[in-house]
Amino acid sequence: MQKVLLLTTIGLLFFGMSISAQKVNTDSLSLVSKISADQLKLGKLQNQVEQKIKNKQDASEQAQKSANENSKAADKLSDKPENKKLARKANNKAAEVKSDSRNARRESDRLDNLNKDIQNLKKRIADNQAKLNKYIQNDKANLVTPDTTQH
């Protein structure tokens, strides 16, 4: 009776170990899949950085150019304050400055958000890699067989 109980306990122990090993294997595979997908996203985002920087610089330069033109129009208007044509031109230039500066801020925000997304992805990849390394180390520890010398 004790032998049957002992053999049943050992059998359940091995059965439980094989189930947990399968869970570890599927968990590690899902982590590898997540890491791979995140690395692909990261590559795509990093490819966008240069274009976003260029867009930000172009928008900034356009805003500065509009501001300079607005300043010139305002100077001309200050020489002849009653001239309606100059007043309209100065007003239009002011509207352009407002629009261009909004676009410059928007492009700057887009670049900041892109950099933030890249940092978040890098962190998530590093976290998942650390989890995967734990699984790999645990698997290596489970593969080591105990000394089974006969006495």
Image: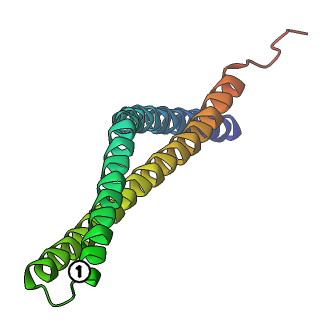
Q: Residue furthest right?
A: 151
Nearer to me, 5 or 144? 144
Q: Quadrant of residue 59?
A: bottom left
> Image height check: is 56 above or below 16?
below
Image coords of residue 141 (percent x, y): 72, 26
Residue, x 42% and y 33% (percent of image)?
Answer: 39
In the image, 149: left or right of 50?
right
Q: Amino acid at mark 1?
A: Leu
Residue, x 68% and y 29% (percent of image)?
Answer: 137
Nearer to me, 97 or 132? 97
Q: Residue furthest bottom?
A: 82
For mark 1, what is the residue? 77
Q: Quadrant of residue 17?
A: top right
Nearer to me, 146 or 41? 41
Query: What colour scheme has been applied to the protein in the rendered image?
Result: rainbow
In the image, 18: left or right of 78?
right
Q: Residue furthest left?
A: 85
Nearer to me, 126 or 119? 119
Query: Is residue 4 visible in this depiction of the protein?
Result: no
All told, the count of numbered labels is: 1
> Image height check: is 73 above or below 112?
below
Query: Is residue 55 visible in this depiction of the protein?
Result: yes
Residue, x 39% and y 58% (percent of image)?
Answer: 108
Image coords of residue 126 (percent x, y): 58, 41
Circle 1: element type:
helix
Q: Residue furthest front?
A: 79
Image coords of residue 56 (percent x, y): 36, 51
- Quarter holding the C terminus is top right
Image coords of residue 31 (percent x, y): 46, 38
